[in-house]
Amino acid sequence: MALYAIGDLHLSFNSNKSMEVFGDGWFDYVNRIKLGFESLESTDITVLCGDISWGMSLDESIKDFKFIDALPGEKIILKGNHDYWWNTISKMNAFFEENKIKSIKILNNNCYYYNEVAICGTRGWMCEDDFSSEENIKIATRENMRLRSSLEAAKNAETKICFLHYPPITKGKDYCNLIPLMNEYDVKVCVYAHLHNYGHKSAVLGIIDGINYELVSSDFINFTPQKIMD
């Protein structure tokens, strides 16, 4: 049994938006994702850190979810900036049940546990040099509230891991408002995605001010889930 993470699957079985148009690094990526999961066991848990499907609705994303459901282990999903299919929790759970999708759980204002370790998270928001934009402030505040709800649900856990879609910090830019919140709840590991291609160069990796940052964008980790914890 192990805990893994991967982000940005960008599946598009029904939506015809293959990531292969972005260069050789994405060649045959769907098959590479399938191969990357082959070493996982049915008892493993993988957190999918957003940008899961290009589908514009749950119905348009059904083949993508069927593909994910067939991969080994349990999956915990959180929202990415391109997950336009995302809906209310009740509608998503009902959709999964109706379509007999059994291995996918939703991380949104809640937490899950891997042994005694709490799995927390939210989408997050982009790092901005200037948060004077009213819309940016609104979204960042909302994401802060969602992460707080997730961390508060895990307040009795000694160890908490935070999973985000957006990086909470990047090179050359100010950090976002989620880092003080992670410090408040004593989060020691933050796993994020979103960065692709040349964006990998802006990734902050390793321990910064007590938090270990890990990037799990699928094209950064060769489309193979990264082990976070045994």
Image (spheres, rainbow, N blue to C red):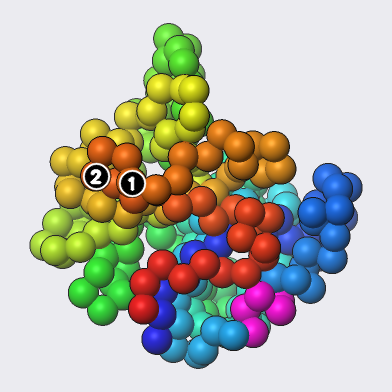
Label at residue 207: 1
Residue 49 position in % (x across, y down) = 52, 56
Viewer-nearest residue: 159 or 85: 159
Residue 20 position in % (x across, y down) = 86, 53
* Residue type at the position of mark 2: Gly
* 9 in the magenta segment: no
Q: Quadrant of residue 35?
A: bottom right
| Residue at numbered disc 2 | 210
Q: Is residue 13 above or below residue 79?
A: below
Viewer-nearest residue: 27 or 201: 201
Residue 223 position in % (x across, y down) = 67, 65
Q: What residue is shown at x 61% (from left), y 37% (from top)?
A: 201
Q: CA distance from mark 1 to mark 2?
A: 6 Å
Viewer-nearest residue: 217 or 178: 217
Q: Is residue 219 left or right of residue 88?
A: right
Which quadrant of the figure contains the N terminus? Answer: bottom left
